[in-house]
Image: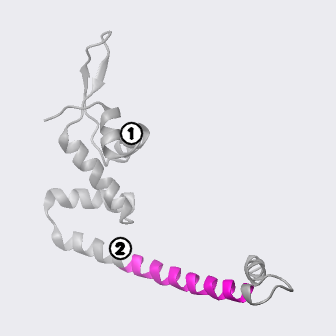
Amino acid sequence: MKIRTIAVLAREGGVGVETVRFYQRRGLMPTPERVSGDRAGGSVRRYGDEDVRRLRFIRSAQTAGFTLDQIGELLALDAGEDRARARELATERLGALDRTIAELEQARAALRRLASACSETMTGPCPIISAFQGMSTR
């Protein structure tokens, strides 16, 4: 097992050191005890392979759109093997993603219509700018 400093852990997890500390404060990552260091009598925290796995799990779950609270629950479920609740969380997240995708598809279609209308004429107000100005007054 490779032993790491927080800087190495952060680099391997694709985050900054402050992000690791934030996850620790939120209870998502453990905070190991300080171990006497080699240099000038200081002490340093050491992280192992499980910490890298956990950090990568958190990042992957965030990429999938889970909130930090949901990630905390998933991490707790991992220890207890509660597949039904994990499935329920994933299903909820899928529903939210489906709603977001539908909204984005509607926005894309509207923007395509505006871009097409903009290219049809070179006189008068731009339909794109007019549409956005109309939205800001609602």
| Dominant secondary structure of the residues highlighted in magenta in the image | helix
Crowding near pointer 2: few (<14 within 10 Å), some, many (20+)? some
Highlighted magenta segment, given as a residue range = 95-118
Q: Could you tell me residue 63's position as x and y percent?
A: 38, 61
Real-space Cα distance between discs 1 and 2? 26 Å
Crowding near pointer 1: few (<14 within 10 Å), some, many (20+)? some
Say what secondary structure mark 2 lies in: helix
Position above or below: 89 against 121: above
Q: Could you tell me residue 28's position as x and y percent?
A: 31, 49
Mark 1, residue position: 21
Quadrant where the C terminus sits is bottom right
Mark 1 and mark 2 residues within 8 Å of each other at the beta carbon: no
**In the figure, is residue 24 to the left or right of 99?**
left
41 is within the stretch colored magenta: no
- Nearest the viewer among 13 and 34 is 13
Mark 2, residue position: 93
